[in-house]
Image (spheres, helix red, strand yellow):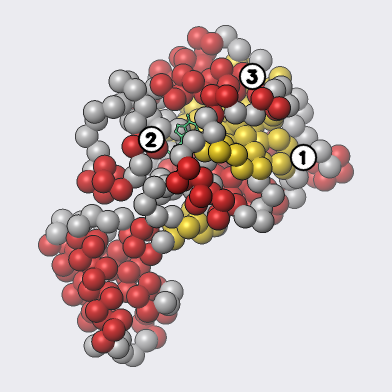
Amino acid sequence: MRPLVLLSEGAAELRRAGLPSPEADAKTLLAHALDATPVALALIPTVDDDTELLFRRLIELRKQHHPVQHLTGIAYFRGVSLAVGPGVFIPRPETEGLVQLVLDWAQQHPDGSSTVGDHTRASANGTPLAIVDLGTGSGAISKALVTELADLGIPAQIHAVELSAEAYRYAQINLEGTGVDLRLGDLSIAFDDLAAQVDIVVSNPPYIPSGAQVPTDVAEHDPQLALFSGEDGLDAIRGIIPVAVRLLKSGGLLALEHDDTHGQCVPELLRAHGEFTRVNCSNDLSGRARYSSAERA
Ligand SMILES: C[S@@+](CC[C@H](N)C(=O)[O-])C[C@H]1O[C@@H](n2cnc3c(N)ncnc32)[C@H](O)[C@@H]1O
């Protein structure tokens, strides 16, 4: 069968099943079945029977709300690809904005928390920025940062922690060879050895109120530990604030992702703690208040 015919049949089935991105999903799944890139599909004349069978099976699984990333085993995040599957949170596009916030700050503070200036000084100085990623999941934030900071010529040492043993195994695969110091453990007691030595603490923690309704794909396939965080969704963030105070140098950055309904209360929590200055909330690309940041006083 011709790939474009198969593609339109698969997309039609996903559309009938009410999935939100039928064409894109079908394209990704057919490319995966063919072991090709989505752009190469137009160049492939025919699909053999085995591949067609595999594609139809993948479409069936997608109709049952298995995430596309679990079916392909790969998630893309900024410029990096990550191994993902059951047991680990699939990195979301919104979190790419959190990474951008950190990169922007790092470019303005290349020598660490108490300086502002031209990042070429970092190479001259050579002192790496110390960065901590709390709740690293697949390692998405750490892998993107290690890659992009290197491209910017900003030396950095990244430390990451994850509580779930299943997620940690994916992070191990994804961060292998990157130099990231990956640890298995609870973020609230992690990095005793780094007190007052860190320039940036970044986290995309769980932040959904327990009991809140989430889409089927999310409820059935993202780990509960990655999603829910107490009655108001703020337990993890309340726990992270004192950890950041303990880890950060004076002037260091705390950057958090949160729910768009928390655009006022997270900055309030940061101000109420009394150890931060320059508290700020910023929007994602669709204009929703998703990131709060502050500097250690
Ligand atoms: C929303 S997911 C984010 C994962 C990843 N940083 C990302 O952006 O794709 C939150 C992660 O925090 C982890 N986590 C939750 N509570 C934790 C804790 N107390 N200590 C360490 N990690 C924790 C979860 O297992 C999950 O991997």
Q: Residue furthest bottom?
A: 45
Point 59% across, 45% down: residue: 142
Amino acid type of the residue that numbered disc 3 sits on in the rendered structure: Arg
Point 82% across, 45% down: residue: 123
Could you classify mark 3 by the number of other residues whose Cα lies within 10 Å: few (under 14), some (14-19), or many (20 or more)? Answer: some
Please state, as top left, top right, bottom left or bottom right, where the N terminus lies in the image. Answer: bottom left
Which x, y percent locates residue 188?
54, 24
How far is the residue under mark 3 from the one under mark 2? 24 Å
Kindly tell me whether mark 2's CB lies below 8 Å from ligand 1.
yes
Which x, y percent locates residue 65?
23, 55
Q: In the image, is 87 to the left or to the right of 139?
A: left
Comes first in the chain, label 1 or label 3: 1
Q: Nearer the viewer, mark 3 or mark 2?
A: 2
Q: Secondary structure beneath disc 2?
A: helix
Q: Which residue is labeled 3 in the image? A: 246
The numbered disc on residue 225 is: 2
Q: Which residue is labeled 1 in the image? A: 128
Which x, y percent locates residue 128?
77, 40
Which x, y percent locates residue 250?
71, 19
Could you classify mark 2 by the number of other residues whose Cα lies within 10 Å: few (under 14), some (14-19), or many (20 or more)? Answer: some
Q: Looking at the image, which is closer to me, 276 or 160?
A: 160
Q: In the image, is 93 to the left or to the right of 217?
A: right
